C-alpha cells in the first residue's frame, strides 16, 4: 500500500481477511487482501481505545521515524519508502506467486 493509505487506515476497517481503504488516490474504495504474515503483524498492534488508527503516527512523524531508522542502519539517502513498496510487489510476484487480480487489489495498479 502507499504510505498515505497505510497512515489513513482505521482499526474499524480491518477485517479478518482484508483491509478496506476508503477514498484512496483515485477516489474509489478498495479491499486489500491480507496475507498470513500481514495478519500476524496486525495482531501485534497496540490496543488503544483512544486512537482508532492502525498506525498512530502523523505523516511527518512517520517520515522522521523512517529517516531516523535509515540513518541508524546506514541506508540514509539510499532507499525510499516507495522503493520498499516496489520490493514488496516483487516479493508478492516471485515469492508468494499471487494471481494478478490479487496483486492489483493490493497495489492499486490498474489492469488497463
Image (tube, helix red, strand yellow):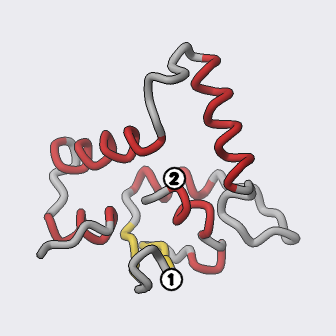
60 displayed left or right of 81:
right
User: Considering only vertical position in the picture, is 99 above or below 16?
Assistant: above
The outermost residue toward the top is 74
The residue positioned 44% from the left and 29% from the top of the image is: 79
Q: Residues within 10 Å of mark 1 (few under 14, many from 20)?
A: few
Could you give the CA–CA distance between mark 1 and mark 2, rounded to whole angstroms? 26 Å
Local SS, label 1: loop
The residue positioned 42% from the left and 72% from the top of the image is: 17
The residue positioned 60% from the left and 70% from the top of the image is: 9
Q: Which residue is mark 1?
A: 23
Q: Residues within 10 Å of mark 2 (few under 14, many from 20)?
A: few
Where does the image place residue 91, in percent across and percent down from the top left? Answer: 26, 42
Give yes or no for contact between labels 1 and 2 (Cβ–Cβ under 8 Å): no
Answer whether residue 79 is visible to the viewer in this image.
yes
Quadrant assignment, res 45: bottom right
Q: Which residue is mark 2?
A: 40
Where does the image place residue 5, in percent across and percent down from the top left? Answer: 52, 65
Quadrant assignment, res 7: bottom right
- Location of the N terminus by quadrant is bottom left
- Location of the C terminus by quadrant is bottom left
Q: Earlier in the sequence, mark 1 or mark 2?
A: 1
**Front residue of this view, candidates 26 and 33:** 26
The residue positioned 52% from the left and 77% from the top of the image is: 15
Amino acid at each position: 500500500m502507499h504510505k498515505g493509505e497505510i497512515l489513513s487506515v482505521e482499526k474499524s476497517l480491518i477485517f479478518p481477511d482484508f483491509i478496506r481503504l476508503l477514498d484512496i488516490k483515485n477516489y474509489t474504495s478498495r479491499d486489500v487482501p491480507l496475507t498470513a504474515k500481514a495478519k500476524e503483524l496486525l495482531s501485534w498492534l497496540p490496543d488503544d481505545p483512544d486512537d482508532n488508527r492502525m498506525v498512530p503516527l502523523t505523516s511527518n512523524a512517520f517520515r522522521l521515524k523512517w529517516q531516523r531508522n535509515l540513518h541508524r542502519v546506514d541506508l540514509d539517502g539510499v532507499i525510499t519508502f516507495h522503493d520498499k513498496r516496489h520490493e514488496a510487489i516483487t516479493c508478492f510476484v516471485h515469492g508468494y506467486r499471487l494471481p494478478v487480480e490479487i496483486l492489483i487489489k493490493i497495489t492499486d495498479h490498474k489492469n488497463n
